[in-house]
Amino acid sequence: MIAVRRAIPATPLDVAAYLADTTSRHTLKLALILLPYGGILFLWFMGAMRDSIGRFEDKFFATVYLGSGFLYVASLYVYGATATGFQLTLDKAGTSLPSADVFHYSRYLTVALLAEYAPRMAGVFVLTTTTIGTRLGIMPRWLTLLGYPVALTLLFLVSILPWTELIFPLWVLTVGCFLLTRNPDDLDNPEETDT
């Protein structure tokens, strides 16, 4: 995400100035090579989280959890395809400058997918994951207190504050580390706590 943010500027640039900067285009190519692996690793994270939930899974929250997670990955992949199209269009142009309208449309579309749509699905994912983890007692209080502000930021502030979408991978890293270090037998049985 950092490589993409640096490679595709959020503010309009002159087409010739962007084409002259080969470093950002090489950075974008590297980011697009790594992108599918990020999606695959996120699917593994979703599987690890569902395994922690186990047989206590709530159908409503599970549906929203899975749907938002899959839509996040799909948004990333659509973004990747769009950014690849943007990159190939610029590479194909060679020394001739592409139309400024095509350049700006491609740039806006790519940035919108990364900074507007994917983060909102990530926000729904964080919200449902935090709610499920809190209800089942598999997340400590500090992780719950972290999850809800992260979700609200991704849902409502991501288009206002640049680079805000980076809090999602940091949240996934935090939850992933917690899942790796906790004892799987620590899950409280909700049925026992109700009686």
Image (spheres, rainbow, N blue to C red):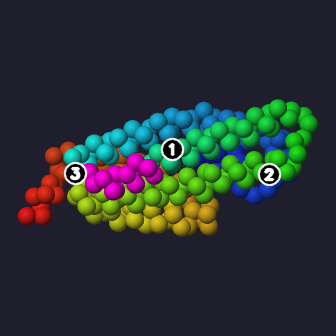
**Mark 1: amino acid:** Val
Dot 3: few (<14), some (14–19), or many (≥20) neighbours within 10 Å?
some
What secondary structure is marked by label 2?
A: helix
Query: In the visual, does 169 lie left or right of 129?
Result: right
Q: Which residues are magenta?
A: 57-68
Disc 3 or 1, which lies upstream in sequence? 3
SS assignment at label 3: helix
Q: Where does the image place residue 69, in percent across and percent down from the top left? A: 45, 48
Q: Which residue is located at x 61 percent, y 43 percent?
A: 78
Determine the main secondary structure of the stretch shown in magenta: helix
Point out which mark residue 104 bears: 2
Secondary structure, mark 1, is helix
- In percent of the image, x 83 and y 41: which residue is there? 19
**Is residue 67 magenta-colored?**
yes
| Residue 46 point in image, percent of width and height | 38, 44
> Mark 2: few, some, or many residues within 10 Å (few <14, many ≥20)?
some
Q: Which residue is mark 3?
A: 56
Q: Is residue 6 something one can see in this rendering?
A: no
Point 80% across, 51% down: residue: 104
- Which image quarter is the C terminus in? bottom left
Residue 82 placed where, x, y %?
68, 42
Image quadrant assignment for residue 138: bottom left
Q: Which of the two residues, 121 or 153, is positioned nearer the viewer here?
A: 121
How far apart are the alpha carbons under marks 3 and 1? 25 Å
**In the rendered image, the vertical position of residue 186 relative to residue 135, given as above or below:** above
Identify the residue at horizontal 62%, vertical 67% (top origin).
160
Instruction: State yes or no: residue 47 in magenta.
Output: no
Label 1 near label 3: C-beta < 8 Å?
no
Residue at mark 1: 73
Q: Do the residues under discs 1 and 2 have CB atoms within 8 angstroms?
A: no
